[in-house]
Image (spheres, helix red, strand yellow):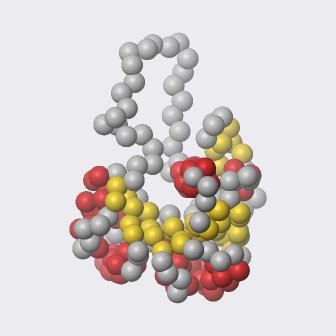
């Protein structure tokens, strides 16, 4: 299946989504905005810092939307360019990795069906007009995934849908329990935000 994934090229978990979809045999088309030259991402297998676009090499086709400033208007301004990418590559479904900007841009392309993956900032930190817009965007999605059970329930409350699916990205603390192993090495903690 040809899947377009509007995502941040600099986000380790977004890169992981693209990698997993590619491993399942899908043709992945990652879409993001042009990046400053000093941005970087993490190579998840070696925990080394690498360039953001390099992290997607061999995993996904990369499409960069051009916009002169890092401003929220870029989602509106670039919807037409994204629509051209979707048509040119005969995309079958879009998975927006955010219920805010990337979902809005996807909706504005007119492309259907689209799916949305919600995170905490998409659901827990929205109020006022942004909450209304997020609810509208989610109500038009063919399917919605959330990062865990708690966010699934909060997302379902927000968009009044009972079909939101929990899809863990990261560590499921209910299933993962490290053993009592002690080590003299320092513990490395990696956070994407």
Relative to residue 5, is residue 43 depicted above or below?
Answer: above
Q: Position of residue 26 (x, y in %)?
A: 61, 59
Pinpoint residue 132: horizontal percent, then vertical percent.
32, 80
Q: Residue 93 sits in which quadrant?
A: bottom right
**The N terminus lies in quadrant:** bottom right
Which of the 4 image quadrants contains residue 46?
top right
Viewer-proximal residue among 119 and 187: 119
Nearest the eye: 74 or 95 = 95
In the figure, is residue 37 to the left or right of 107? right
Question: Is 68 on the left-hand or right-hand side of 2?
Answer: right
Q: In the displayed structure, does residue 151 sit left or right of residue 112?
A: left
Residue displayed at 71% across by 64% down: 62
Front residue of this view, candidates 164 and 55: 164
Q: Position of residue 159 (x, y in %)?
A: 29, 73
Residue name at image x 45 percent, y 70 percent: 115
Q: Is residue 98 above or below residue 53?
A: below
Question: Which residue occupies 39% across, 19% down?
Answer: 179
Task: Judge whether residue 48 can be spotted in this image.
Answer: yes
Residue in view at x 53 percent, y 12 percent = 184
């Amino acid at each position: 299946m040809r899947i377009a994934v509007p995502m941040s090229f600099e986000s380790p978990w977004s890169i992981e989504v693209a990698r997993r979809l590619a491993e399942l045999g899908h043709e992945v088309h990652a879409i993001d905005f042009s990046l400053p030259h000093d941005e970087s991402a993490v190579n998840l297998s070696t925990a080394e810092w690498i360039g953001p676009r390099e992290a997607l090499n061999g995993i996904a086709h990369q499409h960069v939307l051009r916009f002169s400033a890092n401003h929220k208007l870029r989602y509106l301004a670039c919807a037409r360019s994204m629509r051209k990418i979707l048509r040119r590559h005969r995309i079958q479904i879009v998975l927006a990795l955010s219920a805010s900007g990337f979902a809005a841009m996807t909706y504005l392309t007119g492309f259907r069906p689209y799916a949305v993956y919600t995170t905490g900032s998409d659901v827990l930190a929205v109020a006022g007009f942004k909450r209304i817009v997020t609810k509208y965007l989610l109500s038009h999605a063919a399917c919605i995934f959330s990062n865990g059970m708690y966010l699934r329930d909060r997302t379902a409350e927000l968009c009044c849908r009972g079909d939101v699916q929990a899809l863990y990205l990261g560590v499921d603390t209910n299933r993962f329990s490290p053993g009592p192993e002690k080590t003299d090495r320092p513990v490395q903690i990696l956070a994407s935000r």
